[in-house]
Image (spheres, rainbow, N blue to C red):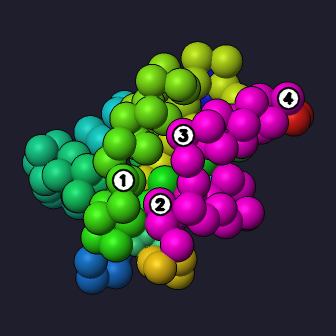
């Protein structure tokens, strides 16, 4: 994403929403919808337009799990981190995924194949740990099954 494209998306989002009450969230959604994430260089312009500090804008971006600050991958692996899945090993599975992918939550693999995101419940609470690869939900996921999913996704365009 070039700086120009980012700037255009930010300018358009600000122009469309700056005059409504609570403009920050609609602006952030519009930027992410347009370019897939909210790059750090978008924050100063948004803060200036809304008369907020950069820290305030950054705080909102980091508070909402929905917003990402780096580009995603071709495929998205979402690991459930909610309570019922935590009780059956979601944290260990997340550690395994981070090691296997070489990236953390809200990041993507170096080859751009996969982005890793947390999600908070996939409706599989009795069959955790649960995950979603693109649109497909997987339940009772073992580390080996996760490896197989990752490998299959890497092989797909
Ligand atoms: S808590 Fe993980 S699917 Fe509901």
Q: Could you classify mark 3 by the number of other residues whose Cα lies within 10 Å: few (under 14), some (14-19), or many (20 or more)? A: some
Foreground of the two, 53 or 79: 79
Marks 4 and 1, how far apart in space? 27 Å
Label 3–label 1 contact, CB within 8 A: no
143 vs 89, left or right, is right
Residue that numbered label 1 is attached to? 89
Magenta residues, start to end: 127-155
Q: Quadrant of the N terminus?
A: top right
Percent of width and height locating residue 114: 64, 35
User: Residue at 12% across / 44% down in the picture?
Assistant: 55
Tell me if residue 102 can be seen. yes
Label 3–label 2 contact, CB within 8 A: no
Report helix, strand or loop for mark 4: helix
Mark whose residue sits in front, 4 or 3:
3
Q: Quadrant of residue 121?
A: bottom left
Quick check: which quadrant has ligand 1? bottom left
Residue that numbered label 2 is attached to? 129
Report helix, strand or loop for mark 2: loop
Label 4–label 1 contact, CB within 8 A: no
Residue that numbered label 3 is attached to? 143
Residue that numbered label 4 is attached to? 155
């Amino acid at each position: 994403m070039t700086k120009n494209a980012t700037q255009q998306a930010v300018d358009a989002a600000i122009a469309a929403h700056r005059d409504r009450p609570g403009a920050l969230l609609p602006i952030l959604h519009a930027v992410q919808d347009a370019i897939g994430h909210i790059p750090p260089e978008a924050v100063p312009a948004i803060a200036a337009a809304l008369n907020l500090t950069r820290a305030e804008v950054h705080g909102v971006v980091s508070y909402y799990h929905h917003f990402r600050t780096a580009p995603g991958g071709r495929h998205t692996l979402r690991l459930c981190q909610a309570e019922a899945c935590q009780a059956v090993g979601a944290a260990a599975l997340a550690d395994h995924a981070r090691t296997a992918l070489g990236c953390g939550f809200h990041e993507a693999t170096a080859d751009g194949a996969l982005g890793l995101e947390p999600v908070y419940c996939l409706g599989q609470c009795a069959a955790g740990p649960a995950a979603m690869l693109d649109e497909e939900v997987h339940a009772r996921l073992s580390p080996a099954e996760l490896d197989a999913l990752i490998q299959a996704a890497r092989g797909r365009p």
